[in-house]
Image (tube, rainbow, N blue to C red):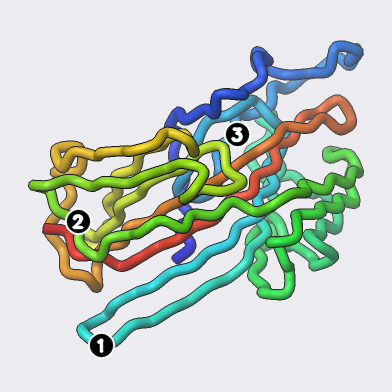
Protein backbone atom coordinates (compact mmCIF):
# COMPACT_ATOMS: atom_id res chain seq x y z
CA UNK A 1 0.00 0.00 0.00
CA UNK A 2 1.57 3.22 -1.14
CA UNK A 3 0.70 5.94 1.36
CA UNK A 4 1.03 9.30 -0.36
CA UNK A 5 0.62 11.60 2.63
CA UNK A 6 2.51 14.71 3.65
CA UNK A 7 3.75 15.06 7.21
CA UNK A 8 6.27 17.34 8.87
CA UNK A 9 7.76 15.12 11.53
CA UNK A 10 11.35 15.36 12.73
CA UNK A 11 13.49 12.28 12.32
CA UNK A 12 17.15 12.88 11.61
CA UNK A 13 19.81 10.28 11.09
CA UNK A 14 22.89 10.59 13.26
CA UNK A 15 25.11 11.47 10.31
CA UNK A 16 23.12 14.54 9.23
CA UNK A 17 25.55 17.14 7.90
CA UNK A 18 25.68 20.37 9.89
CA UNK A 19 24.46 22.58 7.04
CA UNK A 20 22.24 25.47 8.14
CA UNK A 21 19.31 26.11 5.79
CA UNK A 22 19.06 27.48 3.21
CA UNK A 23 22.04 25.62 1.77
CA UNK A 24 24.15 26.97 -1.06
CA UNK A 25 27.68 25.83 -1.98
CA UNK A 26 30.46 28.05 -0.55
CA UNK A 27 31.43 29.25 -4.03
CA UNK A 28 27.86 30.28 -4.89
CA UNK A 29 27.72 34.00 -5.63
CA UNK A 30 24.30 33.96 -7.30
CA UNK A 31 21.82 36.54 -6.07
CA UNK A 32 18.98 34.30 -4.94
CA UNK A 33 15.60 36.00 -5.01
CA UNK A 34 13.61 33.07 -3.64
CA UNK A 35 14.11 30.77 -0.69
CA UNK A 36 13.88 27.03 -1.37
CA UNK A 37 11.10 25.25 0.46
CA UNK A 38 11.73 22.76 3.27
CA UNK A 39 11.82 19.22 1.92
CA UNK A 40 8.95 16.97 2.94
CA UNK A 41 9.10 13.36 1.82
CA UNK A 42 5.96 12.49 -0.08
CA UNK A 43 5.14 9.31 1.74
CA UNK A 44 4.32 8.53 5.30
CA UNK A 45 7.88 9.03 6.54
CA UNK A 46 7.47 12.75 5.81
CA UNK A 47 10.30 14.58 7.49
CA UNK A 48 11.49 18.14 7.17
CA UNK A 49 15.11 17.49 6.24
CA UNK A 50 16.61 20.48 4.48
CA UNK A 51 15.63 23.51 2.51
CA UNK A 52 15.77 22.26 -1.02
CA UNK A 53 14.61 22.89 -4.56
CA UNK A 54 13.50 19.37 -5.36
CA UNK A 55 13.05 15.85 -4.08
CA UNK A 56 13.50 12.65 -6.02
CA UNK A 57 12.25 9.53 -4.31
CA UNK A 58 12.70 5.90 -5.31
CA UNK A 59 10.18 3.69 -3.53
CA UNK A 60 9.60 -0.07 -3.29
CA UNK A 61 6.25 -1.12 -1.82
CA UNK A 62 5.01 -4.49 -0.58
CA UNK A 63 1.58 -4.87 0.97
CA UNK A 64 -0.43 -7.77 2.36
CA UNK A 65 -4.13 -7.10 2.95
CA UNK A 66 -6.42 -9.58 4.69
CA UNK A 67 -9.97 -8.72 3.66
CA UNK A 68 -11.51 -11.64 5.57
CA UNK A 69 -10.30 -15.01 6.90
CA UNK A 70 -8.67 -16.90 4.05
CA UNK A 71 -8.93 -13.91 1.70
CA UNK A 72 -5.51 -12.30 1.34
CA UNK A 73 -4.47 -9.80 -1.33
CA UNK A 74 -0.77 -9.20 -1.97
CA UNK A 75 0.52 -6.31 -4.04
CA UNK A 76 3.91 -4.79 -4.78
CA UNK A 77 5.30 -2.04 -6.92
CA UNK A 78 8.28 0.16 -7.68
CA UNK A 79 7.82 3.90 -7.97
CA UNK A 80 9.67 7.02 -8.98
CA UNK A 81 8.56 10.37 -7.56
CA UNK A 82 10.02 13.66 -8.80
CA UNK A 83 8.90 17.03 -7.45
CA UNK A 84 10.56 20.41 -8.04
CA UNK A 85 9.35 23.56 -6.31
CA UNK A 86 10.41 27.12 -5.60
CA UNK A 87 8.76 29.15 -2.85
CA UNK A 88 8.42 32.12 -5.20
CA UNK A 89 5.76 30.21 -7.17
CA UNK A 90 2.63 28.31 -6.23
CA UNK A 91 2.97 25.44 -8.69
CA UNK A 92 5.51 22.72 -9.30
CA UNK A 93 8.35 23.59 -11.66
CA UNK A 94 8.91 21.93 -15.00
CA UNK A 95 12.17 19.97 -15.17
CA UNK A 96 12.00 18.62 -18.69
CA UNK A 97 12.19 14.88 -19.24
CA UNK A 98 12.95 12.88 -16.08
CA UNK A 99 14.01 9.25 -16.00
CA UNK A 100 14.75 6.72 -13.29
CA UNK A 101 16.81 3.73 -14.41
CA UNK A 102 15.95 4.70 -18.00
CA UNK A 103 12.18 4.72 -17.34
CA UNK A 104 10.39 8.05 -17.81
CA UNK A 105 8.91 9.55 -14.64
CA UNK A 106 5.96 11.93 -15.15
CA UNK A 107 5.98 14.99 -12.91
CA UNK A 108 3.78 18.07 -12.34
CA UNK A 109 1.76 19.38 -14.02
CA UNK A 110 1.39 15.70 -14.88
CA UNK A 111 0.80 13.12 -12.20
CA UNK A 112 4.20 12.85 -10.46
CA UNK A 113 4.26 9.13 -9.67
CA UNK A 114 5.41 6.32 -11.89
CA UNK A 115 4.81 2.66 -11.19
CA UNK A 116 6.62 -0.06 -13.06
CA UNK A 117 8.19 -3.30 -11.90
CA UNK A 118 10.86 -2.92 -14.57
CA UNK A 119 12.64 -0.08 -12.75
CA UNK A 120 14.84 -2.61 -10.90
CA UNK A 121 15.44 -0.36 -7.89
CA UNK A 122 17.16 -3.15 -6.02
CA UNK A 123 20.21 -2.40 -8.18
CA UNK A 124 20.23 1.36 -7.52
CA UNK A 125 18.43 4.56 -8.46
CA UNK A 126 19.97 6.30 -11.47
CA UNK A 127 18.27 9.66 -12.08
CA UNK A 128 18.59 11.75 -15.25
CA UNK A 129 17.04 15.22 -15.36
CA UNK A 130 16.83 17.05 -18.68
CA UNK A 131 16.41 20.41 -16.97
CA UNK A 132 14.63 23.64 -17.84
CA UNK A 133 14.89 27.37 -17.25
CA UNK A 134 14.04 26.75 -13.58
CA UNK A 135 15.72 23.39 -12.91
CA UNK A 136 19.33 22.57 -13.89
CA UNK A 137 20.19 19.55 -15.99
CA UNK A 138 21.87 16.82 -13.95
CA UNK A 139 22.45 13.12 -13.48
CA UNK A 140 22.82 11.32 -10.17
CA UNK A 141 23.20 7.62 -9.45
CA UNK A 142 22.15 6.80 -5.90
CA UNK A 143 23.96 3.49 -5.89
CA UNK A 144 24.17 0.79 -3.24
CA UNK A 145 21.67 -1.58 -1.69
CA UNK A 146 18.04 -0.64 -1.23
CA UNK A 147 16.55 -0.23 2.27
CA UNK A 148 14.84 -3.34 3.62
CA UNK A 149 13.22 -4.70 6.77
CA UNK A 150 13.10 -8.44 7.46
CA UNK A 151 11.70 -8.54 11.01
CA UNK A 152 8.20 -9.65 11.97
CA UNK A 153 5.10 -7.50 11.54
CA UNK A 154 2.07 -8.38 13.68
CA UNK A 155 -1.44 -8.74 12.31
CA UNK A 156 -3.01 -7.28 15.46
CA UNK A 157 -2.33 -3.96 17.20
CA UNK A 158 -3.28 -3.80 20.87
CA UNK A 159 -3.73 -0.57 22.79
CA UNK A 160 -3.23 -2.49 26.03
CA UNK A 161 0.04 -4.30 25.32
CA UNK A 162 1.69 -1.92 22.83
CA UNK A 163 4.10 -2.92 20.07
CA UNK A 164 7.60 -4.39 20.16
CA UNK A 165 10.15 -4.21 17.33
CA UNK A 166 13.87 -4.79 16.92
CA UNK A 167 15.73 -2.46 14.57
CA UNK A 168 19.36 -3.49 14.11
CA UNK A 169 21.76 -4.86 11.53
CA UNK A 170 19.88 -8.16 11.45
CA UNK A 171 16.42 -6.76 10.67
CA UNK A 172 17.21 -3.50 8.83
CA UNK A 173 19.61 -3.10 5.92
CA UNK A 174 20.80 -0.10 3.88
CA UNK A 175 18.78 2.44 5.89
CA UNK A 176 19.44 5.40 8.18
CA UNK A 177 16.02 5.50 9.84
CA UNK A 178 12.79 3.53 10.12
CA UNK A 179 9.23 4.79 10.42
CA UNK A 180 6.47 2.79 12.11
CA UNK A 181 3.04 3.88 10.89
CA UNK A 182 -0.39 2.68 12.00
CA UNK A 183 -3.22 3.81 9.75
CA UNK A 184 -6.97 3.29 9.89
CA UNK A 185 -10.20 5.00 8.85
CA UNK A 186 -12.55 7.00 11.07
CA UNK A 187 -15.75 8.34 9.47
CA UNK A 188 -14.15 7.87 6.03
CA UNK A 189 -11.12 9.96 7.04
CA UNK A 190 -7.63 8.47 7.30
CA UNK A 191 -6.22 8.58 10.82
CA UNK A 192 -2.62 7.64 11.54
CA UNK A 193 0.07 7.35 14.19
CA UNK A 194 3.72 7.51 13.18
CA UNK A 195 7.06 7.43 14.95
CA UNK A 196 10.60 7.42 13.65
CA UNK A 197 13.53 5.36 14.98
CA UNK A 198 17.17 4.91 14.14
CA UNK A 199 17.95 1.93 11.95
CA UNK A 200 20.22 0.56 14.71
CA UNK A 201 18.12 1.60 17.69
CA UNK A 202 17.79 -1.98 18.94
CA UNK A 203 14.76 -3.12 20.93
CA UNK A 204 11.87 -0.68 20.56
CA UNK A 205 8.65 -0.54 22.59
CA UNK A 206 5.75 1.67 21.52
CA UNK A 207 3.27 2.03 24.35
CA UNK A 208 -0.37 1.76 23.37
CA UNK A 209 -1.16 5.10 25.00
CA UNK A 210 0.65 6.81 22.11
CA UNK A 211 -1.86 5.55 19.55
CA UNK A 212 -4.87 5.26 21.83
CA UNK A 213 -6.64 7.91 19.72
CA UNK A 214 -6.95 5.47 16.81
CA UNK A 215 -10.41 3.96 16.53
CA UNK A 216 -10.91 0.22 17.02
CA UNK A 217 -10.98 -1.36 13.59
CA UNK A 218 -11.22 -4.70 11.86
CA UNK A 219 -8.34 -6.24 9.94
CA UNK A 220 -9.81 -4.95 6.66
CA UNK A 221 -9.49 -1.32 7.82
CA UNK A 222 -6.16 -0.96 9.62
CA UNK A 223 -2.61 -1.10 8.28
CA UNK A 224 0.75 -1.31 10.02
CA UNK A 225 3.63 -0.17 7.82
CA UNK A 226 7.38 -0.36 8.40
CA UNK A 227 9.30 2.19 6.32
CA UNK A 228 13.12 1.97 6.24
CA UNK A 229 14.71 4.82 4.29
CA UNK A 230 17.93 6.69 3.56
CA UNK A 231 18.66 9.97 1.82
CA UNK A 232 21.43 12.16 0.51
CA UNK A 233 21.57 15.83 -0.47
CA UNK A 234 23.40 16.89 -3.63
CA UNK A 235 23.92 20.33 -5.22
CA UNK A 236 23.54 20.97 -8.94
CA UNK A 237 23.56 24.40 -10.55
CA UNK A 238 23.92 26.06 -7.12
CA UNK A 239 20.68 24.45 -5.98
CA UNK A 240 20.29 21.55 -3.61
CA UNK A 241 18.20 18.44 -4.24
CA UNK A 242 17.40 15.56 -1.92
CA UNK A 243 17.46 11.96 -3.14
CA UNK A 244 15.62 9.31 -1.16
CA UNK A 245 15.55 5.52 -1.28
CA UNK A 246 12.70 4.01 0.67
CA UNK A 247 10.81 0.77 1.20
CA UNK A 248 7.30 0.26 2.56
CA UNK A 249 6.38 -3.11 4.06
CA UNK A 250 2.71 -3.08 5.04
CA UNK A 251 0.30 -5.55 6.66
CA UNK A 252 -3.38 -5.14 7.26
CA UNK A 253 -4.08 -5.26 11.00
CA UNK A 254 -6.94 -5.17 13.43
CA UNK A 255 -6.71 -2.46 16.09
CA UNK A 256 -8.05 -3.46 19.50
Residue drawn at the location 88% of the way across and 39% of the way down: 136
Determine whether label 2 and label 1 are within 8 Å by CB.
Answer: no
Which of the numbered marks, if any, corresponds to residue 39? Answer: 3
> Is residue 115 positioned above or below 83 on the image?
below
- For the C terminus, the quadrant is bottom left
Comparing labels 2 and 3, the label whose residue is closer to the camera: 2
Q: Where is residue 16 drawn, in percent x and y?
A: 61, 23
Question: Does residue 134 appear to the left or right of 163 in the view shown?
Answer: right
Of mark 1 and mark 3, the one earlier in the sequence is: 3
Residue 203 or 100: which is nearer the viewer?
203
Which mark is drawn over residue 70?
A: 1
Q: Are marks 1 and 3 in contact (CB under 8 Å)?
A: no
**Residue 81, which numbered label?**
none
Q: Position of residue 236 (x, y in %)?
A: 86, 33
Q: CA distance from mark 2 to mark 1?
A: 20 Å
Quarter of the image that includes the N terminus: bottom left
Disc on the earlier residue, 2 or 3: 3
Q: Is residue 140 above or below residue 102?
A: above
120 relative position to 207: left or right:
right
Check disc 2: other Cα within 10 Å, few if <14, some if 14-19, many if 20+.
many
Residue ID at (21%, 70%) = 219
Task: Give the label on residue 157, or none.
Answer: 2
Label 2: state its secondary structure.
strand
Which circle's residue, 2 or 1, is located before the other in the chain? 1
- Please indicate whether residue 71 sits to the left or right of residue 100 in the image: left
Amino acid sequence: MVMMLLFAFACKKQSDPAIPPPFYPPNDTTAHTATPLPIVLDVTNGTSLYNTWGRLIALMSDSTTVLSPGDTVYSSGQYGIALFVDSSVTTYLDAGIISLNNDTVPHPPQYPFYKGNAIALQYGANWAIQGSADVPSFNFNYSGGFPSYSGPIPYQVSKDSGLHFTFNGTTVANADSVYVVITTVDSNNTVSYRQCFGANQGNVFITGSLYNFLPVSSISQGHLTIIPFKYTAQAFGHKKFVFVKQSEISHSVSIQ
